[in-house]
């Protein structure tokens, strides 16, 4: 089969969220290039294998590179043509021969605080006959709608896998018990619903949206796989600044692949690409990786970019922001890092 005739292979991890993201790009590819054939290729990564262990047992987060190495290997070996990543998980330094070919239009960058509904738990407890029961059910703690971080009770256990979220939570509430949680999105939600040792969970709004979950105006979490009795509060940027690249999908490709380069040019969302370029340049210049306690968010304002950042490295809180030319996104990120180091 000639190179022009063979299908273009889109590499992805096999989790529900990764597949949903890959299908978003797949659909964009087919719409933009109806004469080409695209196929999704699922690749299991080391990170996926390690996540099969208990979602609450591991004390340290997994390095994000464990979720990208096998996909990048497939690109370098010409076993795939594109690799789709949650951009927040993609290291800022890519292997030689690969580059970030395109960035999708950004989804909601905010985080969401999930917790159990006190009214639902009271209703369940009042039932004469409970069909399913497991030890600890009666110890689960619930809360009223629209719960915020300041409203959490002293010592509440809040689960996250992110050092960035952990640092921002503890900066506001040093008394909180922030615990590690792992596994896919649905597993984490199920863990919160059933495990009394957890009071709340923080997840990315974009991931929930891509899995067809939504937060209703009343503050309820809705979706096909959502357990009953869960509430949600969207955390505004003043409460929780996102990590670099959050809400965007990164499309990785081989540097010299002109055929795929044409496709990536059509898929790329320019404003989002410039914003994440500023964020990733800031993160790289700070000497941090995906699991550093550093947050950065850029947004376009006319022909300029506004970049906000916070760093908790070395136990010191540093906050700052900068504005610069939209065309000089990388330089803006480096300048802000120089100011905050």
Image: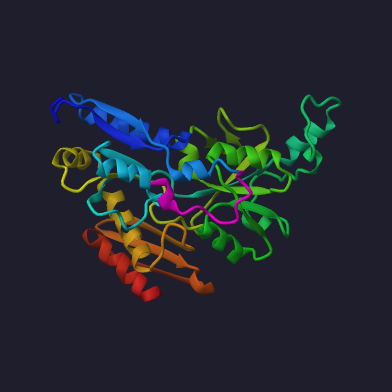
Q: Residue 288 or 322: which is nearer the viewer?
A: 288
Q: Is any part of residue 218 visible from this angle?
A: no
Counting from the top left corner in percent of width and height, residue 108 is at 43, 45
Is the magenta region chiefly helix, strand or loop?
loop
Q: How is the image coloured?
A: rainbow
Residue 310 appears in the figure: yes
Front position in the image: 81 or 290: 81
Which quadrant of the structure image shows residue 115?
top right
Where residue 148 appears, as percent x and y from the top left, is 63, 53
Depth check, front residue: 13 or 273: 13
Q: Residue at x 35, y 59 (%)?
A: 279
Q: Residue at x 54, y 46 (%)?
A: 203
Question: Residue 232: within the magenta?
Answer: no
Quarter of the image that includes the C terminus: bottom left
As displayed, is residue 234 above or below residue 324?
A: above
Q: Residue furthest front?
A: 77
Q: Is residue 60 magenta?
A: yes
Residue 240, above or below 174: above
Q: Residue at x 69, y 64 (%)?
A: 175
How far across and down, in percent of the image, does residue 14 sit? 43, 34
Q: Which residues are magenta?
A: 54-68
In the rendered image, which quarter contains the N terminus?
A: top left
Write down the quadrant of residue 134 in the picture.
top right
In the image: residue 157, left or right of residue 225 = right
Residue found farthest to the right: 128
Above or below, comparing residue 230 to residue 310 in the picture: above
Judged left or right of residue 64, residue 198 is: right
Judge by depth and name the residue closer to the eye, 104 or 298.
Answer: 104
Q: Position of residue 164 (x, y in %)?
A: 50, 59
Q: Residue at x 22, y 31 (%)?
A: 32
């Amino acid at each position: 089969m000639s190179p022009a005739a063979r299908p273009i292979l889109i590499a992805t991890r096999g989790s529900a969220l990764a597949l949903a993201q890959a299908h978003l790009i797949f659909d964009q590819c087919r719409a933009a290039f109806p004469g080409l054939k695209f196929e999704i290729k699922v690749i299991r990564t080391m990170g996926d294998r390690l996540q099969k262990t208990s979602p609450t047992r591991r004390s340290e987060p997994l390095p994000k590179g464990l979720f990208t190495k096998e996909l990048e290997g497939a690109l370098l070996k010409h076993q795939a043509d594109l690799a789709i990543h949650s951009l927040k998980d993609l290291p800022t330094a890519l292997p030689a021969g690969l580059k970030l070919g395109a960035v999708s239009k950004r989804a909601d960058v905010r985080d969401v605080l999930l917790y159990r509904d006190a009214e639902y738990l009271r209703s369940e407890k009042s039932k004469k006959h409970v069909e399913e029961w497991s030890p600890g059910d009666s110890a689960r703690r619930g809360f009223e709608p629209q719960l915020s971080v300041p409203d959490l009770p002293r010592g509440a256990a809040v689960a996250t896998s992110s050092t960035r979220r952990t640092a921002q939570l503890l900066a506001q509430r040093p008394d909180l018990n922030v615990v590690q949680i792992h596994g896919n999105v649905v597993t984490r939600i199920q863990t919160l619903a059933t495990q009394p040792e957890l009071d709340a969970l923080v997840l990315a709004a974009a991931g929930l949206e891509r899995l067809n979950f939504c937060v209703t105006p009343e503050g309820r979490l809705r979706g096909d796989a959502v357990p009953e009795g869960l509430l949600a509060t969207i955390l505004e940027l003043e409460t929780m600044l996102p990590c670099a690249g959050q809400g965007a999908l990164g499309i990785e490709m081989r540097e010299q692949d002109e055929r795929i380069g044409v496709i990536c040019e059509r898929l790329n969302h320019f404003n989002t690409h410039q914003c994440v370029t500023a964020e990733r340049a800031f993160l790289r210049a700070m000497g941090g990786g995906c699991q550093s306690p550093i947050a950065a968010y850029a947004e376009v304002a006319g022909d300029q970019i506004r970049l906000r950042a916070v760093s908790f490295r070395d136990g010191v809180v540093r906050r700052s922001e900068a504005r610069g030319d939209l065309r000089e996104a990388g330089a803006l990120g480096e300048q802000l890092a120089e100011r905050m180091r």
